């Protein structure tokens, strides 16, 4: 029924966007990514990409499978995932999470998942360097020397003044930034942000959006998952839309704003109930 | 085939006991998410209560603190006097005595819930494990205090004499009737519990709360009330089993706690979920044990490796490895935190003061104090190993004592047998312990929380049985005379008998104490350094959140392995020092109880800080804290009891342990001083302002 | 934490307090609610009222604080400021959460609150703490549940689980029924069928229903009144027809397109 029209709409939009972007400079590509939990298909044959230099948006109503998609890409669902993930020319499919991070693909969580009992700086330090057994011994004997990348990110995110406090002492907005910072310092080529605006009030959301935008200008590629359409439409360069596990549209903010299938997915189809 | 059949039939008694304890463990876990190490101790306490009521009509009262003691002491009067026993007439008949004892059990269960485990519902597994260990210690020592530990009291069997004395002939094997009766009763209890959970509203609500406490609460179910009822039920069940089987096993304060290990194995097989699997598994385990035991005796070619004793542990470890996260997760939220891992700032003046004090005591102190401080320092190194693995990485290890054993035995092999010189031999011994530590870390890669506690406990006991007993690697039994030479370097000896200018004729001489002090300082420095290093940071990250750590590029498995390895090395050092102290290996201290106590005391001291480990060292058996307790306040036989209660209180009220409490008080004093200073400054400025205002006036 | 922010005067012209008819029993009264977790407010300054027999929609994009509001009513989220009076008594903390349910508040949470290890019949038996549960009332509303009685709930499809959750809610004879994201993860065919049932429950049993939904049109079609939250603040409220009529504003406040 309505599925057919949706698919058509999606096809039109993504074809249009593909024409202008020509798929060049894709940092991350998924091919037919599928996640199954028992009989439930949470992500269904999704093929999408993130381009370098872009802030890419991933939106969709609650339960559309956005977080599941991030989990699958970052290696947290090895047993449930099918399809392929390519990142900067490497195949990351079913790689362990810490190896995915080493490859330069990091993420944040909606529920933050910070390391609550160590300082903000340590939160970032942990992620800042890959620790080999030998490296650990060398670091233990000589002490940590290079903290410049961590300082840089702290400065960039405006966290320098609270670097020695514990995350739980900070405001919700700044805690979100600690999560972002942790994802950034891992030498990330692409950061996937899961619902960074959830639980923030409107002013904080606008502020967060500006921060994200300035990070993109600073050269970080990002994928932003959020329910807040206004945030996503305002700051993203390109947007993918998921519904019930499938990709239903891809396009620029303007295209997405005017796409009836997207509005329908969000508000429930306008026509069907009346 | 005959003798094997006989072994299988004879094992039904032991099987019944394991099974009865196992279903109790399953009951407690299903209703309150707790692995109750104290289950056996409850059985013991209630069985003693029954005996006391039955033989003399006396109801034992657990030792209670007397809040008026200082007042009484000053005025030399006795205002409050809790009786040891309440006299309830002459000896009771066995059935009223049974009813009375079970009523006590129900009350105990209720008290445990409301005073202890209710407050711990949302705490992390470590806190719960520690609290249940504290409860176990307190109950067991209460029995020892009230009834004495040595002679088992006569206990009036519940089964009539006709059952007890008759035997039955099964295919030519004579088996006492009562074994079958025990087995039948146990299976009856299992069926009862099963039916209770399957058919009643209580069971339905408990199952709902176990699957998802939040959802159950939304349906109006009080998870609290369910847990309270289940605690009563579990305590009554434990008590009944204790009374029923005590005549068969003979009643001692420690028996049932030892049976807890095979019962845990069976409960794990049942994933702490199915009563039937737990019961049948326990019976099967007992049968297999008996068969193995017989094979070891009967066949010369069959290695005497105590395989029967190792079997429960093997079952536990295999069940863990095969099934991954064994325990079904409960829908409860954990909101509590692990104790905070404060970095220890290096304060040279403070450190030097303590080192000087320890050195002074070790050189000039009287014998008790010297020995106490030396033991405490060795204990502190052992506690440091737990700071690394449990405090920093959050992995509950009940195996540290096994590593000390491996190192002590390694010292015998490398030092005494192979003649490797001093600094190398103990280091090799500690490395041997490290190898075992890495081996034991393997379960930690798959399971966490209370499951890991059980896995490590089982592995520790398996190491003990395999290596130190029977034909095991070190063959200590029957070969106790493997002594070590005193350690020496550059011609200077520093063992317990080495000469020393002051007090050189006493054993242990100050030389050894100073040697241990040096090692302790090195170990503390190493752990402080670890906390500040990148690896230490990653450890804390893993403890805080494994998923997030992995996403931040932390190799979680690698960090866990490193932690277990480092911890085993430290424990190995402690073991080697202990070996030098004793001059030979002794193994009687490696047991379930000792393994549990080590973790408990480390927690009491403060499990996540170096300072906490130093406190813990004073608390360990024959440490300086114990010596002081003995001499200053005559703690004597109350020592373990007080320790158990202190553990429970710590877990409930102050998870940071003594170190955290100490920090809190210091903070409070500092804040008070700061406020006072501020007030005084304010007063001064006010005064000067007033003076200034007045000044220009006239 | 902004203490004010109860409704933004400029956004909603249609904000009318109170339930429709006078004399209607009020089953839920929320005043000046700040609620959240770990001391962080997710909902700020919410006023909301539900009367008996009334269906009230609580709308807004995810992260707006709808679920937190429901959690605060059932005692699962902490109330940082303001009051929640449900079925005649104020709501206490987590330890008293089960008492809220016993007063007649039934909360169907986002993941439906179905216990997977219990059978359908056992799930339904949880509806009442005392007395026998007559499952007929549930199968009247959802005949499809009839043949599934002895199946573990974990094996049901999403739609069947939602029916079970609603069926159980009906059996518990609530005075206040709160349903969180009924349509979550369900195909349109399924939830379009379930939505009218919510209206029937309110009409037949006189229960007040607080419906949290993302699908605005579906929800407002069965509701008497609606509230729209965005980022923890109330941005619109009023009778359902008025909200639907002001389509532009609704879409805008919902999707935040005008900001």
Image: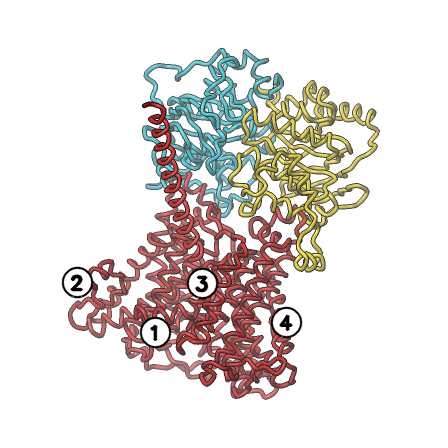
Chain colours: A yellow, B red, C cyan
C37 or C20: nearer the viewer: C37
Q: Which residue is drawn at 70% across and 42% down?
A: A149
Q: Is mark 4 on a helix, strand or loop?
A: helix
Task: Give the Cα distance between marks 1 and 2.
Answer: 45 Å
Which one is closest to the eye, mark 1 or mark 3?
3
Instruction: Measure the alpha-carbon separation of dots 4 and 2.
Output: 59 Å
Looking at this view, is A68 or A141 the one in front?
A141
The residue mark sitting in front, 1 or 4, is 4
Q: Nearer the viewer, mark 4 or mark 2?
A: 2
Check if mark 3's residue and mark 2's residue have beta carbons within 8 Å. Answer: no
Q: In which chain is the residue bearing label 4? A: B
Q: Please tell me how crowded label 2 is: few (under 14), some (14-19), or many (20+) other residues with Cα within 10 Å.
A: few
Is residue A152 toward the left or the right of residue B604 in the image? Answer: right
- Residue at the far front in the pictured view: B698
Marks 3 and 2, the one that precedes in the sequence: 2
Q: Label 4, on which residue?
A: B431
- Quick check: can you spot residue B282? no
Q: Left or right: where does residue B641 sit relative to residue B663? A: left
Proximity of marks 1 and 3: CB atoms separated by less than 8 Å: no
Q: Name the residue under label 2.
A: B75
Which residue is denoted by mark 1 in the rendering? B246
Residue B615 disc label: 3
Q: Are marks 1 and 2 in contact (CB under 8 Å)?
A: no
Within the image, what quadrant is residue A134 found in?
A: bottom right
**Residue at 56% of width from left, 63% of height from top?**
B319
User: Are the residues under badges 1 and 4 in a single subunit?
Assistant: yes
Question: Secondary structure beneath disc 3?
Answer: helix
x and y percent of residue A123 in the render? Answer: 61, 45
């Amino acid at each position: 029924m309505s599925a057919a029209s949706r698919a058509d709409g999606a096809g039109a939009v993504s074809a249009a966007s593909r024409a202008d972007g020509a798929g060049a400079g894709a940092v991350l590509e998924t091919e037919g990514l599928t996640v199954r939990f028992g009989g439930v298909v949470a992500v269904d044959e999704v093929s999408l990409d993130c381009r370098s230099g872009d802030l890419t948006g991933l939106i969709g109503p609650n339960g559309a499978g956005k977080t599941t998609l991030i989990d699958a890409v970052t290696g947290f669902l090895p047993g449930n995932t099918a399809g392929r993930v390519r990142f900067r020319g490497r195949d990351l499919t079913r790689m362990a999470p810490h190896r995915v991070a080493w490859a330069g693909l990091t993420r944040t969580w909606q529920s933050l998942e910070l390391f609550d009992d160590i300082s903000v700086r340590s939160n970032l330090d942990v992620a800042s360097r890959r620790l080999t057994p030998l490296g650990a011994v060398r670091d233990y004997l000589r002490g940590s020397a290079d903290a410049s990348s961590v300082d840089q990110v702290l400065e960039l995110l405006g966290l320098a003044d609270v670097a020695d406090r514990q995350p739980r002492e900070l405001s919700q907005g700044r805690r979100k930034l600690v999560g972002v910072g942790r994802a950034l310092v891992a030498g990330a080529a692409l950061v996937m942000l899961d619902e960074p605006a959830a639980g923030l009030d409107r002013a904080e959301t606008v502020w967060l959006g500006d921060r994200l935008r300035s990070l993109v200008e600073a050269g970080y590629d990002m994928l932003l998952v959020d329910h807040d359409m206004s945030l996503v439409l305002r700051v993203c360069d390109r947007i993918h839309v998921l519904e019930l596990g499938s990709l239903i549209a891809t396009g620029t903010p303007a295209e997405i704003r005017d796409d009836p299938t997207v509005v329908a997915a969000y508000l429930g189809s306008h026509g069907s109930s009346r | 085939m005959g003798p094997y059949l006989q072994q299988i039939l004879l094992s039904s008694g032991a099987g019944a006991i394991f099974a009865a304890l196992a279903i109790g463990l399953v009951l407690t876990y299903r209703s309150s998410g707790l692995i109750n190490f104290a289950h056996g101790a409850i059985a013991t306490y209630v069985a003693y209560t029954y005996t006391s009521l039955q033989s003399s009509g006396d109801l034992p009262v657990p030792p209670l603190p007397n809040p008026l003691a200082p007042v009484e002491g000053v005025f030399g009067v006795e205002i409050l006097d809790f009786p040891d026993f309440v006299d309830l007439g002459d000896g009771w008949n066995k059935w009223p005595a049974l009813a009375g004892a079970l009523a006590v059990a129900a009350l105990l269960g209720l008290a445990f819930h409301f005073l202890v485990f209710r407050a711990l519902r949302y705490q992390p597994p470590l806190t719960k494990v520690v609290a249940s260990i504290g409860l176990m210690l307190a109950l067991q020592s209460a029995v020892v205090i009230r009834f004495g530990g040595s002679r088992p009291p006569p206990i009036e069997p519940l089964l009539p004499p006709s059952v007890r004395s008759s035997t039955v002939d099964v295919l030519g094997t004579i088996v006492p009737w009562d074994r079958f009766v025990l087995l039948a009763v146990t299976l009856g209890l299992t069926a009862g519990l099963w039916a209770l959970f399957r058919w009643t509203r209580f069971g339905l609500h408990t199952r709902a709360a176990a699957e998802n406490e939040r959802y159950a609460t939304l349906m109006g179910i009080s998870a609290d009330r369910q847990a309270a009822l289940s605690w009563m039920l579990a305590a009554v069940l434990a008590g009944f089993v204790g009374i029923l089987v005590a005549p068969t096993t003979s009643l001692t304060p420690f028996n049932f706690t030892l049976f807890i290990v095979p019962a845990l194995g069976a409960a794990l097989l049942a994933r702490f979920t199915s009563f039937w699997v737990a019961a049948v598994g326990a019976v099967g385990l007992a049968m297999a044990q008996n068969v193995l035991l017989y094979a070891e005796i009967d066949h010369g070619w069959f290695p005497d490796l105590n395989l029967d004793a190792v079997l429960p542990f093997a079952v536990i470890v295999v069940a863990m490895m095969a099934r991954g996260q064994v325990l079904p997760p409960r829908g409860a939220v954990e909101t509590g935190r692990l104790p905070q891992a404060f970095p220890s700032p290096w304060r040279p003046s403070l450190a030097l003061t303590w080192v000087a004090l320890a050195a002074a005591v070790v050189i000039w102190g009287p014998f008790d104090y010297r020995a106490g401080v030396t033991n405490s320092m060795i204990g502190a190194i052992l506690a440091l190993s737990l700071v690394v693995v449990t405090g920093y990485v959050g992995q509950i290890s009940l195996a540290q004592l096994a590593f000390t054993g491996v190192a002590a035995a390694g010292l015998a092999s490398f030092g005494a047998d192979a003649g490797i010189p001093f600094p190398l031999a103990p280091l090799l011994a500690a490395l041997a312990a490290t190898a075992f530590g890495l081996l034991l870390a393997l379960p930690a890669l798959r399971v966490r929380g209370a499951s890991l506690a059980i896995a490590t406990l089982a592995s520790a006991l398996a190491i003990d049985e395999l290596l130190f007993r029977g034909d095991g690697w070190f063959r200590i039994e029957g070969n106790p005379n493997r002594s070590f030479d005193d350690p020496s370097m550059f011609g200077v000896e520093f063992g317990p008998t080495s000469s020393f200018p002051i007090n050189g004729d006493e054993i242990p001489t100050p030389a050894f104490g100073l040697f241990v002090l040096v090692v302790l300082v090195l170990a503390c420095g190493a752990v402080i350094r670890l906390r500040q290093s990148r690896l230490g940071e990653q450890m804390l990250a893993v403890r805080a959140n494994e998923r997030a750590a992995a996403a931040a590029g932390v190799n979680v498995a690698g960090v866990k392995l490193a932690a277990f390895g480092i911890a085993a090395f430290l424990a190995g050092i402690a073991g080697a020092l202990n070996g030098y102290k004793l001059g030979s290996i002794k193994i009687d201290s490696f047991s379930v109880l000792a393994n549990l106590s080590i973790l408990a005391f480390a927690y009491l001291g403060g499990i996540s800080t170096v300072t906490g480990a130093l406190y813990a060292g004073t608390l360990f058996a024959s440490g300086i804290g114990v010596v002081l307790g003995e001499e200053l306040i005559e703690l004597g036989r109350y020592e373990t009891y007080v320790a158990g209660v202190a553990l429970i209180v710590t877990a409930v009220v102050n998870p940071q342990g003594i170190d955290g409490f100490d920090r809190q008080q210091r903070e409070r004093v500092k804040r008070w001083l700061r406020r006072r200073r501020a007030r005084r400054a304010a007063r001064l400025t006010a005064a000067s302002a007033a003076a200034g205002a007045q000044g220009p006036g006239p | 934490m902004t203490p004010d922010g109860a409704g933004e005067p400029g956004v909603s012209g249609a904000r009318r307090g109170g339930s429709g008819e006078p004399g209607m029993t009020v089953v839920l009264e929320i005043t000046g609610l700040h609620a959240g977790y770990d001391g962080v407010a997710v909902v700020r300054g919410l006023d909301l009222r539900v009367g008996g027999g009334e269906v009230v929609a609580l709308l807004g994009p995810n992260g707006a604080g709808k679920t937190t509001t429901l959690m605060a009513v059932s005692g699962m989220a902490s109330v940082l400021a303001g009051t929640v009076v449900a079925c005649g008594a104020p709501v206490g903390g987590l330890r008293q959460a089960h008492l809220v349910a016993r007063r007649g508040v039934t909360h169907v949470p986002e993941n439906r609150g179905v216990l997977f290890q219990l059978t359908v019949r056992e799930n339904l038996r949880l509806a009442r703490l005392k007395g026998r549960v007559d499952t007929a009332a549930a199968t009247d509303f959802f005949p499809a549940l009839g043949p599934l009685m002895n199946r573990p709930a974990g094996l049901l499809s999403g739609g069947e689980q939602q029916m079970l959750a609603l069926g159980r809610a009906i059996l518990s004879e609530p005075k206040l029924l709160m349903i969180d994201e009924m349509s979550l993860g369900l195909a349109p065919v399924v939830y379009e069928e379930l939505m009218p049932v919510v209206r029937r429950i309110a009409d037949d049993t006189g229960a007040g229903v607080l419906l949290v939904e993302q699908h605005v049109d579906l929800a407002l079609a069965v509701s008497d009144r609606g509230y729209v939250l965005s980022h923890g603040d109330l941005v619109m409220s009023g009778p359902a027809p008025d909200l639907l009529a002001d389509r532009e504003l609704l879409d805008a406040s919902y999707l935040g397109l005008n900001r």
